[in-house]
Image (tube, rainbow, N blue to C red):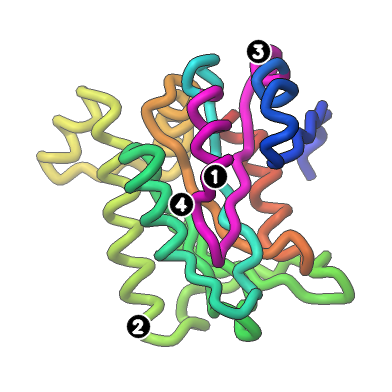
Amino acid sequence: SKKCRFNVIDTPGHIDFTVEVKRSLRVLDGAVVVFDGVAGVEPQSETNWRYAEEAQVPRICFINKLDRTGASFERSYKSILDRLSKKAVRVQIPIGLEEHHEGVVDLLKMKAYYFEGEMGNQVIEKDLDSLPENLKAEAQKYHSELVEKIVETDDAMMTEYLEGIIPDIDVLKVTLLKAVIDNAIFPVFAGSALKNKGVQLVLDAVVDYL
C-alpha cells in the first residue's frame, strides 16, 4: 500500500571492508544495522556503529536469525544497550524463538504479526489476545517503556504525559521519527530475514522513521 523507492547500499559486515563501510556512510540518509540473534553485538558491529556515530547517520536496529538454535532477542538487545547505546529501545518483541519463532509484536500498535505462506509473504495481523498471557504482559510492560522513551524526547509531551495524557499513536510516530532523525532513539526490531519474518515491518519502519 505504500509506494516508496528505496536506494539500498548493502555493505559487507566483514572487517576487510571497513573502509568501504566508512565511505558509504557519508551518503546515507539512514541505516539498518543488522545483528545476529545468537551472537548479538560482534566486534565489527562496534566499529561500524562508531563510524555511523561519527557520520551522524540515523539508525534502526534489526535483530535477525531469531529462528536459529540458541537465539535470544533479549540477550542481543542487552548487548546493544551495553556495548553500543543506551538509546536503543524495543519497538518489537518476537513471538517465540528458535524453531518456535512465528512472528513479532508491534509495541506501538500493540498488534501481533504472523508471517505465513511459502516465504512469509502473507502478513497476518492479530490482536494480542492471540498471545499467551506471559507474552501479553511483557508486551504491555515494554509498550509503556517505549511510550515513555518517546515522550521523554519532547518537553511539552512529557509534561502532558506526567499529567496522565497519553498521546495517540500518530503523534507518537511523528515524535519517534523526529527522535530517530536526531539520533535520540534507535528503535530495535526483530525477525528472521531467511524466513522473511519481520522484514516487511522493517521496510515500513524505514519509511516511517528514517
Residue on which disc 1 sits: 61
Kindly identify the residue that appears in the image at 66 percent across and 72 percent down: 114
Please rate how many residues cluster around mark 4, counting C-alpha atoms within 10 Å: few if below 14, some from 14 to 19, many from 20.
many
Is 181 included in the stretch rendered in magenta?
no
Q: Sequence-wise, which precedes: disc 1 or disc 4? A: 1
Q: Which numbered mark, 3 or 1, is in the foreground of this view? A: 3
Kindly identify the residue that appears in the image at 37 percent across and 27 percent down: 184
Give whichever of 32, 82 is nearer the camera: 82
* Gap between marks 1 and 2 measured at Cα: 25 Å
Where does residue 118 sit, x and y in percent of width and height? 89, 75
Left-right relation of 95 to 172: right
- Figure check: 162 above or below 202: above
* Gap between marks 3 and 2 measured at Cα: 43 Å
* Gap between marks 2 and 4 measured at Cα: 18 Å
Left-right relation of 31 to 166: right
Q: Sequence-wise, which precedes: disc 2 or disc 4? A: 4
Please rate how many residues cluster around mark 3, counting C-alpha atoms within 10 Å: few if below 14, some from 14 to 19, many from 20.
some
Q: Sequence-wise, which precedes: disc 3 or disc 2? A: 3
Residue on which disc 3 sits: 26
Left-right relation of 15 to 172: right
Which structural element holds mark 2? helix
**The C terminus: image quadrant:** top right
- Figure check: 208 above or below 91: above
Please rate how many residues cluster around mark 1, counting C-alpha atoms within 10 Å: few if below 14, some from 14 to 19, many from 20.
many
Q: Which amino acid, by three-letter code, is at mark 2?
A: Asn
Q: Are marks 2 and 4 in contact (CB under 8 Å)?
A: no
Residue on which disc 4 sits: 91
Where does residue 4 sit, x and y in percent of width and height? 80, 31
Which structural element holds mark 3? loop
> Which numbered dot is residue 86?
none
Residue on which disc 2 sits: 134
